[in-house]
């Protein structure tokens, strides 16, 4: 019997498919590949096209449902080139690279997942995209302060970070008419 190609076949249909061809299946392992659907075949032995006897057991490796967790590496202050190598060895992907005003050219200043800072050592899903803020080597640059009033604080914090700035004093105003987490006042004022 010629062994069929099982790559990408769903686990639920695998046993019936092989028994109809007088073959048996044995799951030999699992791994996580982000470009394959969960619970599908990602490897087999004997390989597709091999000739085997009836009732031969075909060993398959299945793509897991959830990615394994890895520790977030510390990319802060490393060069962008080095950060890319570290991400690759950890099985992580590079997301957006945002250049910000800083004297340290091509140095990683901040690491984020989905817009939120991620601390080194935190467990994160393997294969996830890591966004980086990287210094452009220009240092201090003057620009007009934008109007940040009325925006959510998280959005303001990311905006300032992308321009090489940090939030200074943060004060909560309990009797405000605004929704919680919205900027109601800023200093310096807009366009100074």
Image (cartoon, rainbow, N blue to C red):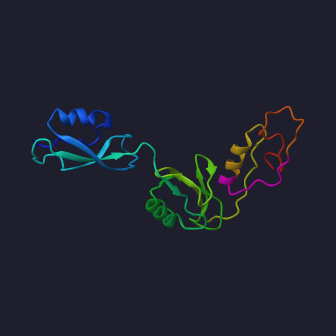
Query: Is residue 22 covered in magenta?
Result: no
Which span is picked out in magenta?
A: 161-171
Q: Residue at x 64, y 64 (%)?
A: 138
**On the rendered structure, is 11 left or right of 93?**
left
> In terms of depth relative to the viewer, which is nearer, 122 or 35?
122
Q: Residue at x 36, y 43 (%)?
A: 36
Q: Residue at x 63, y 58 (%)?
A: 119
Residue with the most extreme front position? 55
- Residue 189 image offset from top left, x and y in percent: 83, 47
Q: Residue at x 74, y 43 (%)?
A: 153
Residue with the most extreme right position? 175
Magenta: predominant secondary structure element? loop
Residue 69 visible: yes
Query: Is residue 163 covered in magenta?
Result: yes
**On the rendered structure, is 3 left or right of 44?**
left
> In terms of depth relative to the viewer, which is nearer, 168 or 191?
168
**On the rendered structure, is 32 left or right of 167?**
left
Residue 97 visible: no
- Residue 71 image offset from top left, x and y in percent: 54, 59
**Image mark count:** 0
Q: Quick one: quadrant of the N terminus?
A: top left
Task: State the image quarter where residue 149 is shown.
Answer: top right
- Residue 80 image offset from top left, x and y in percent: 52, 63
Residue 47, relative to residue 180: is it above or below? below
- Residue 145 image offset from top left, x and y in percent: 76, 49
């Amino acid at each position: 019997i010629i062994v069929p190609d099982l790559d990408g076949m769903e686990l639920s249909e695998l046993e019936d498919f092989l028994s109809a061809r007088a073959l048996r299946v044995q799951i030999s392992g699992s791994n996580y590949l982000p470009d394959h659907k969960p619970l599908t075949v990602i490897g087999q032995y004997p390989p597709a096209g091999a000739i085997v006897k009836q009732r031969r057991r075909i060993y398959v490796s299945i793509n897991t449902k959830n990615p394994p967790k890895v520790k977030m590496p510390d990319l802060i202050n490393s060069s962008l080139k080095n950060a890319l190598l570290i991400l690759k060895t950890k099985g992580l992907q590079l997301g957006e690279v945002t250049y910000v005003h800083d004297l340290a050219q091509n140095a990683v200043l901040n690491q984020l997942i989905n817009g939120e800072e991620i601390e080194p050592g935190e467990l994160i899903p393997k294969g996830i995209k890591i966004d980086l803020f990287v210094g452009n080597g220009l240092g201090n640059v003057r620009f007009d302060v934008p109007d940040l009033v009325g925006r959510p604080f998280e959005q303001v914090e990311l905006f300032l970070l992308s321009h090489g700035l940090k939030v200074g004093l943060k004060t909560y105003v309990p009797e405000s008419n605004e929704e919680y987490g919205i900027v109601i006042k800023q200093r310096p004022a807009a366009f100074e």
